[in-house]
Amino acid sequence: MGMGTGTRETSAAAVPQRRIEDERLITGRGQFVDDVRLPEGRPAMLHVAFVRSPYAHAEIGAVHVERARAQPGVVDVRSGADLAGALHPFEIGVPLPDLRKTERRPLAVGKARYVGDPMAVVLAESAEIAETARDLVEVDYTPLPAAVDVEAAAAPDAPLLYDDFDSNVAFEAPSGGGDIEAAFTEADRTVTLRLVNQRLAPSSLEPRACLFDYQPETGELHAWLSSQAVYGAREALAGVLDLDRAHIHVVSADVGGGFGSKTRFVGEEFVAAWLAVTRGRPVKWIETRSENLQTQTHGRGQVSYVEAAFTNDGLLLGLKVRTYADLGAFLTAISAMVPARVPSQLCGPYRVRAVEGRVVGVLTNKVPTAPYRGAGRPEAAYILERTMDRIAAELGLDAAEVRRRNLLAPDAFPYRTPTGLTYDSGNYQAVLDRALELADYQGWRARQRERRAANDPRQIGIGLATFIESTGGAMAGPGAPQEAATVRVMTDGTLLVESGVATNGQGHFTAFAQIAASVFDLPSSSVAVRMGDSDLPAFGFGTFGSRTLQTAGTAVHLAAEAAREKALHVAAERLEANPADLVIEGGKVMVRGVPGRAIGLGELARLVEEQPDLIAHEPPNRVNGAPIEGLAAWRDFAPPGTTFAFGAHVAVVEVDTETGEVRLVKMVAVDDCGRVLNPFLVEAQVRGGLAQGIGQALYEEAAYDAETGQPLGGTLLDYSLPTMTSVPAFVTDSVETPSPLNPLGAKGVGEAGTIGGPPAVVTAALDALAPLGITALDMPLTPRKVWSAIQAAKSESK
């Protein structure tokens, strides 16, 4: 992957190093939750299975557990009513004004509110026994009408999910900025659109998984999770189980994907943990694929009505957007955050004068929605990019030219949008130019004209997306650390990095080793990295929001710098030299210009172990108060603001007008994620995101029966995911405009593909179908859907 053009600062860490963490995984030596084996002497492990509602909405009567409880090997069976007094309800943490907070317990009490809602739990000596006994539990249900469609569920006469509310509307959040009335008054034209971001199932390779081991004799709870946030998991377990967090030890095992869905618990994990505590035996739960599709949180689920005001030369002046957000049956800790943040992102990379947004969060009889890769940014980008294409079509202008006219200029930064966001840096024009060049934009336009002139049934379409990606940003109150790390010089001269990150495969081991190694001028092979353990001298809010490198990576950088200064201080005393005259090369500290006067890093570490007072003592770390001993330093970092990455993606598709099939021919992605520390890691993140973005555009939808609320994709035979043959060979590149908000100059890129991919592919398909007068299609663009639109357009033209 090329380093691109643009402003760049040299860094020793900026090298295209291959990932160091993969050999163990690809040779079968990884340890996922299901691979964890407890030490000898621990009691035999128990397993759980959950009884789930077959109804989207129903009153819960008696739960008959006798037959299941009588089965050999069954240890316990509990219903939601049994656990109601034992486990605290979830805490809903998003501080939206007038938010109706739904009480949610780990097992349903009173009502089933979606298909798959957990009614009861079976605890048994094996997973097979638990699953067999689960089918013997009988629940008396009284089915109720279901609220399925998000807009219909918002109506006053819709079936109510919660009897103590007078509607299913959980919140209404108005937002925006600028003089919207003036923008529409000054506009030459307006256009309206109805746009849908369909529900998506995150579908990580590894479903949810947890193992809990409670030791009654010590009061310690050990947890192994497939998680994106080990410290958050510790806090949640402490709150729901009423345990001292100091007695809870959480380890994130190897994780087979999360994409936002493993940031918070939904409920079953609390039940498994409670059973481990009350039984004093280890308890494991591994979610099945069908459970994952039915009951793991979904992403997206928004319907937006857009009115755009623009001039005859294609300048977008103002946007009015009303969004119905499908929240599902209850609120997770951050369900409301995702749709509520969309209006603030609606200026995108453009000089929009004013935005008026209103989000209506609606409860429905479906599995809850929560963050999924992008978490509000893909929805905002889709709204904007579909709008920009419609403006271009209305005016008969080239889609790339309309975007070029609206993009912020390089000298506009830092730029404050009418909605209150501040963009730190950017060079948007350079990114767009590079994407168009790599895509051979003009060449494809010429081929498109040839196909149209020949009336070829396989029409070419070219689609664009230029977008922002807000990354990093404050996650806690003033003065509180977001991420913290310890860097330690070992007695063998190597370095140990201890980070609070719960890595999900993004390449953090490689990146953090590079960062620490560059500070000490060592090869990355001389750095070991530990993370994903709440007992480490570190801290982390979680691996999400494209934030980890710029926040946790900066913490590693700062800790490495501090450890280096300590090493130089000790070496200066031993070598009787001024610290300013010392350099570190080849694992030794030496006097500049006098190679014979040197001392090894390992010897310095041994000296500090023997004589701790050689260096100033680190204060106890701010997470658990433990001292930092040895030649080491702890540092935390909270960024002063949010960084804003930018991308320009180009898609070329071929649409078969006889079958409706949309074939992706070419996909080009050029991104500006600030300083690129490792091009291989950036490219991998962009490619993975593009695959998921293409999935939303062409294949994926967590669909439900409109009347009964039954999910229509209970297996991967029904829920379509992109495969290797579904995507072309991507072309990627980068332009670098370093962020001033962190010393690495880094911004995020982890969600770029899911933000830019869908609008680029959809606008390409609509571009191919433009001669037929087709201006609107909702994702996913399945052959049946596209073919039906083509037939309808042909019928209207007769």
Image (cartoon, rainbow, N blue to C red):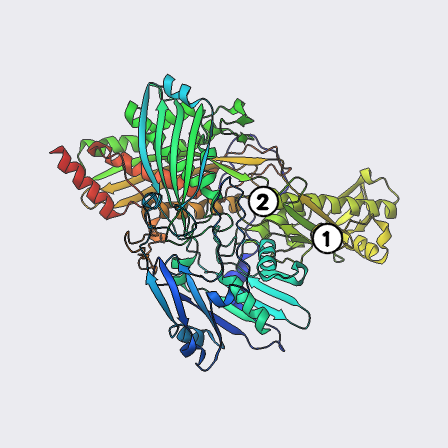
Q: Residue at x 56, y 61 (%)?
A: 253
Q: Is residue 17 left or right of residue 522?
A: left
Tag of residue 787: none
The residue type indicated by label 1 comes to Arg
Mark closest to the chain's N terminus, 1 or 2: 1
Which kind of residue does numbered mark 2 sit on?
Leu
Q: Is residue 758 left or right of residue 21?
A: left
Instruction: Write down the residue under mark 2.
Output: 549
Please tell me which residue is depicted at 54% across the width and 64% down the height of the picture: 85
* Residue in the picture at 56% in, 77% down: 44
Q: How many marks?
A: 2
Q: Nearer the viewer, residue 493 or 626?
A: 626
> In the picture, residue 52 is in which quadrant?
bottom left
Spot occupied by residue 532 in the image (x, y as percentages of width and height):
60, 56
Answer whether residue 29 is visible to the viewer in this image.
no
Residue topped by disc 1: 488
Q: Residue furthest bottom?
A: 72
Q: Position of residue 12 (x, y in %)?
A: 64, 41
For label 1, the SS is: strand
